[in-house]
Image: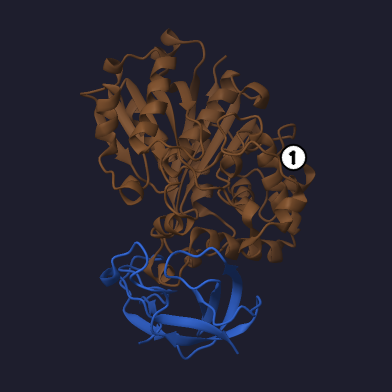
Amino acid sequence: MGVAIIEASMTKFGQRDAWICELLAEAGKECMADSSVDPDDVEHLYVSNMASGEFEGRTGVMNALAHDLGVMPAYSERVDQTSSSGGAGMYEAWQSVASGASDMTLLVGGEKMTHRTTPESTDVIASITHPVEYKHGLTLPSFAGLTARHYLERFDAPRESLARVAVKNHENGVDNPNAQFQKEITIETALESPVVADPLRLYDFCPITDGSAAMVFTTEERAAQLTDDYVVVSGIGGATDTHVVHERDDPTIMGGVVESSKRAYEMAGLGPDDLDVAELHDMFTILEFLQLEGIGVAEQGTAWELAMDGDTAKDGELPINTSGGLKSKGHPLGASGVAQGVEVFEQLVGEAGPRQVEADIGLACNVGGFGNCVITTIMEATQ
Amino acid sequence: MSFDAHQCPNGHVTYPGHPLCPECGEHQTETIDLSERSGEVVTWTTSTATPPGVREPNTLAIVEFDVAGTFVRAVGQVTTEDVETGDIVEPVYVEELRDPEAGIKEPESHEWDGYRFEPV
């Protein structure tokens, strides 16, 4: 059964006073209102969230949200796939409609993080690592430092190429009213910012963020009856790589990105050359290169050239992270994959305002851990 | 204490061990102690934003060991910030790599001792 997305919306990302259930309700309520879907129509509700228990001591958020939005007795489920919980939620929502189990599915992703200190949040996220990694104090940023050094040394890539990713995504974020940062930065600022995980510096990293995002999934047939502005999920794939990061054959190849995008391309009958726009999981600048190579847009060891040449800028050959990416928009873990979908949706239906590019086919790649779990989704415009 | 890599009957070696060999699915039946061997630094980083209970700064490296022609990698803390890719390092035993009480983990659920890498 063809699956369509008929509405997508997100809250303001940043440091918010609201707690997790309020954030989820804010995005869910707005998305249902904008889509004119009645709560009684919702048959499945998925809530993407990594760690509401660990961050806030709040569990059972899918039930809380179902009650807050009045969608009972819909089937409800919380989806945790760490940083790719949002993408995994898109997979679950797609599957619920594709299988015929649900005619109308609401997906809401969210996370509340900023009330914790940076070391505490870093530790919650680092708890996904293997015990032999955790006991040494490995964190996600330190995996990025290890990988970035290897990439730069092996492929003789300039350090400036990573800074250019940060500069580009900050520039894009200026036009996104929901982004945590709406501020341009210079290459010098990025290169001179404090070291976080050598050779990476502060501006190579996304911030810690509160926020929520939501989407409504239904059948293509029903979508066509309800609205003119919908997109079709033409391909989606998920894949898992090793838990222990150093056990991967090649530290610069994200196997989960390669496999999940291969599955999504096969399902859609498309390839990397067909893409008009993409949202990649730039939790760290180096990840934008590894994903561009993993999804087949660039050969291994060459994605840095695209950043240097401006090919991934908004006016480039393939605009990447027109939303500002995680780097500028922010990264509320469970919300991020859904928010990537929100941006691709808005680009395809022509609602991206000053961020708008010419796009009929868009891709979102949501990465959990350091590439441990990955979901790639391809969406197509219908108009 | 030993620094054990694990081997299956088909000769695949991993660190750490797994219930089944990730390569072929066989049970891992042998252990190879890496603590008396030297390895080569594949890459390294110095982390300055460390979680509770972790030393700051925390220099970390991925190190590759040659075990009879099979390469196996391990990750861990380095004894110094003065390290480069390609350096030869040796494991040095440390009783407590981070404070078990400070982080999110239940202290009893983990082992906290292990090996740091020291450039030779």
Residue A2 shows in the view: no
Residue B109, compared with residue A5, is above or below; it is below
Q: Residue at x 52, y 14 (%)?
A: A229
Q: Residue at x 54, y 54 (%)?
A: A254
Picture quadrant where residue A76 is located: top left
Q: Residue at x 66, y 64 (%)?
A: A199
Element under label 1? loop
Picture quadrant where residue A91 is located: top left
Residue A171 shows in the view: yes
User: Is A145 in front, or is A14?
Assistant: A14
Type of residue at label 1? Asp
Residue annotated with mark 1: A311
Residue A180, compared with residue A100, is above or below; it is below
Q: How is the image coloured?
A: by chain
Q: Residue at x 26, y 71 (%)?
A: B108
Residue A296's spot in the image, x, y percent? 62, 45
Q: Quadrant of the C terminus of chain A?
A: top right
> Crowding near pointer 1: few (<14 within 10 Å), some, many (20+)?
some
Left-right relation of A199 to A234: right
Task: Identify the chain drawn in blue.
Answer: B
User: Is A277 in front, or is A271?
Assistant: A277
Task: Identify the chain drawn in brown.
Answer: A
